[in-house]
Image: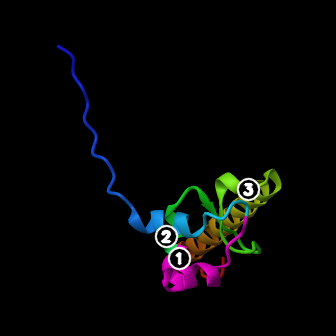
Amino acid sequence: MSTQLMFAQPAPDTEADDLRTAMSVAGEWRTAADVTERLGWPDRLVREVAGRCHDIISFPGSPGYKLLAHCTVAEFRRFVDTNRSQARKMIARTIRAEKLYHAVGTGRAGV
């Protein structure tokens, strides 16, 4: 007797599908203004949905949003490098805040 593992399938993400459709012009960056106009969504929702999609890139200084399948190697490298740089800065800030928090708790404020 064979045993099969059954895994729950993730719920369909229709918002992500709608965003991908709105971005489907081959090779083009889509500005946030363009995407919000096409979908009638607020900018915050566009950012949130794009953040859930591993196949849509955007980064500080980019012209907007782009499907990963349409990225050049240079665009993808810039996406990776920018996100890694941001992650390092966020981790460093968190560590500094943690040190200060613990220093205040022990009477050593100003670390």
Q: Are marks 1 and 2 in contact (CB under 8 Å)?
A: yes
Residue beneath the point at 59% across and 78% down? 35
Residue farthest along the top direction in this orientation: 1
Give the side of residue 101 with respect to residue 7, left or right.
right
Q: SS for tag 1?
A: helix
Say whether disc 3 or disc 2 marks the residue closer to the N-terminus.
2
Where residue 81 sits: x, y (%)?
76, 58
Mark 3 crowdedness (10 Å alpha carbons): few <14, some 14-19, many ≥20: some
Name the magenta segment's main secondary structure: helix
Q: Which residues are magenta?
A: 28-47
Where residue 106 sits: x, y (%)?
51, 75
Residue beneath the point at 65% across and 55% down? 68
Label 1 to label 2: alpha-carbon separation: 5 Å
Q: Visible in this render: residue 107?
A: no
Q: Amino acid at mark 3?
A: Cys
The C terminus: image quadrant: bottom right
Label 3 to label 2: alpha-carbon separation: 19 Å
Residue 28 placement: quadrant = bottom right
Label 3 to label 1: alpha-carbon separation: 19 Å
Q: SS for tag 2?
A: helix
Residue beneath the point at 39% across and 62% down? 13
Q: How is the image coloured?
A: rainbow
Residue 2 placement: quadrant = top left
Instruction: Look at the image and say whether residue 36 sits in the magenta stretch.
Output: yes
Q: Amino acid at mark 2?
A: Val
The disc placed on residue 71 is 3
Per the image, the residue denoted by label 1 is 46
Instruction: Look at the image and say whether residue 45 sits in the magenta stretch.
Output: yes
The disc placed on residue 49 is 2
Q: Are marks 3 and 2 in contact (CB under 8 Å)?
A: no
